[in-house]
Image (spheres, rainbow, N blue to C red):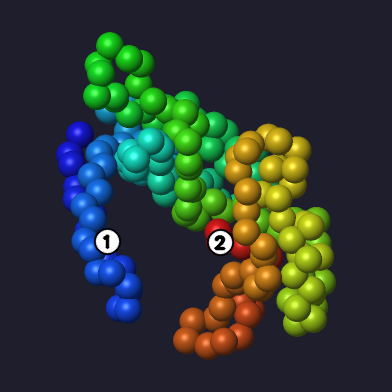
Amino acid sequence: MEEIAVITALPNGKENKNTSIKFSVQSGYIPRNSSLVFLPCLGNKGAVAIRFQFHNSDICVVNSHLAAHTEEFERRNQDFKDICRRMQFSQDDLTLPPLTIMKHNVVLWLGDLNYRISDLEVDHVKDLIAKKDFESLYNHDQLKRQMDEEVVFGGFTEGEIDFQPTYKYDTGSDQWDTRSENTIAHYFL
């Protein structure tokens, strides 16, 4: 593991002491289609993660790109589980088993998770967006439903969703997607 020094300074008006905090950093990468890690079930998606120790806390930050398309939520669930199982970090004491993502005190998970708004017609979604009825939209969010059912992201909490979901737009305009497939909006969190 590498050591990185972080220098902190107090704002003006306070005693200006610089404090050096050292922590260890280690990273991992799981591509979805790589013979190196024998994970062909993940196709062209994957994850990268970094872990570090800050004082007495083990912290892991994960960035992932999960399977796309509305009907593929079960595949996204499996991608999450595979990443949690396969991403491993060696410990300083090599006699100890590697740490997996969920063995950290704090886990921050970001990325294009690709969970969608489902069970609503496109026009109804657009109407709810226009009315800024984000709560109704969020109640149809696949990730929220999977978390509520404790299928994925057990123990994680998500901040309040008080913004409209992302949506495809016609190129060079602010007009919603007018292509024939007219896909439904989703939250990129």
**Placement of 136 over or under 56, stated as above or below:** below
Viewer-closest of 150 and 115: 150
Residue at which label 1 appears: 8
Q: Secondary structure at mark 1?
A: strand
Residue plotted at (28% across, 11% down): 95
| Left or right of 2 in this view: 156 | right
Residue plotted at (41% across, 46% down): 61
* Picture coordinates of residue 55, whole percent (x, y): 34, 40
| Left or right of 81 in this view: 39 | left
Residue plotted at (56% across, 78% down): 169
- Mark 2, other Cα within 10 Å: few <14 / some 14–19 / many ≥20: some
Q: Quote the CA–CA distance across marks 2 and 1.
A: 32 Å
Mark 2 or 1: in front is 1
Q: Quick check: can you spot residue 85?
A: yes
Q: Quadrant of residue 155?
A: top right
Q: Quadrant of residue 36?
A: top left
Identified by mark 2, the residue type is: Phe
Identified by mark 1, the residue type is: Thr
User: Which mark, by number, is residue 188?
Assistant: 2
